[in-house]
Image (cartoon, helix red, strand yellow):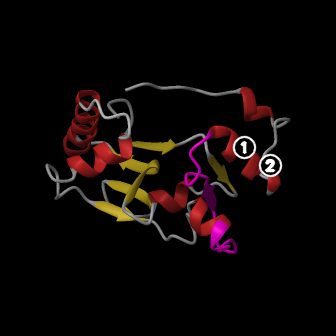
Amino acid sequence: MKKSNEVLWIDNDIYLFQNCLKDLQSKQGTFVMQDDLWGPCTGFFLVRSGSLAISKIHSSIQWLKSNTNPEVNDQHAFHTSLKKFPFVGITLLDREEYPNGQIYFNQKKTSRAKIVHCNYLTKTSEKVDRFKAHQLWNESDEGFSKVSKYYI
């Protein structure tokens, strides 16, 4: 976030039906996030850099590092830090345009989807199997083995 004005975070269990970057950039807010049915999803979001956004991310990371409960994750940390930063601008994306697995696969709301986030399954093998069952898995894709990783 110190190297760019905007950062797009995409978990590896997301299938993109289209390049939606311009759509995300057109939305207002410091954080433009997928709506995970229970709140903002930390698996798919655009964040606009600034001291407030950096402090929020830092607070989430610190909370996660200090929490020894194996049941918690980055999403819990982000939600907890909302109490410290309730004034951070968060825009939630339309659930049918940016659906999670529950909405896309289970509720079958697929016609407007720009992505699908297979986050309602816990095991990677289950996510891969679900993507394969819906012809959304392509290991021959040139980008499949090319991954850039950036760590905070």
Q: Look at the numbered disc 1 and give the secondary structure of its residue.
A: helix
Residue 25 position, x and y percent, is: 45, 57
Query: Measuring 80% from the left and 49% from the top, which residue is drawn there?
Result: 132
Q: Which of these two is toward me, 78 or 97? A: 78
> From the image, which quarter does the C terminus lie in?
top left
Q: Which of these two is toward me, 100 or 106? A: 106
Residue 6 position, x and y percent, is: 40, 44
Q: Which contiguous range is marked in magenta? A: 106-123
Would you identify the image quadrant in which residue 12 lies? top right
In the drawing, what numbered circle is on residue 132? 2
Residue 14 position, x and y percent, is: 62, 49
**Amino acid type shown at disc 1:** Val
Residue 28 visible in the current orientation:
no
Query: Measuring 34% from the left and 54% from the top, which residue is drawn there?
Result: 31
Q: Is the magenta stretch mostly helix, strand or loop?
A: loop
Q: Give the alpha-carbon distance from disc 2 to disc 1, as whole Å.
A: 6 Å
Residue at numbered disc 1: 128
> From the image, which quarter does the N terminus lie in?
top left
Residue 64 shown in magenta: no
Category of crowding for the residue at label 1, using alpha-carbon neighbours closer than 10 angstroms: few (below 14), some (14–19), many (at least 20): some
Residue 138 visible in the current orientation:
yes
Q: Is residue 38 above or below residue 119?
A: below
Query: Measuring 55% from the left and 53% from the top, which residue is drawn there?
Result: 21
**Amino acid type shown at disc 2:** Lys
Q: Look at the numbered disc 2 and give the secondary structure of its residue.
A: helix
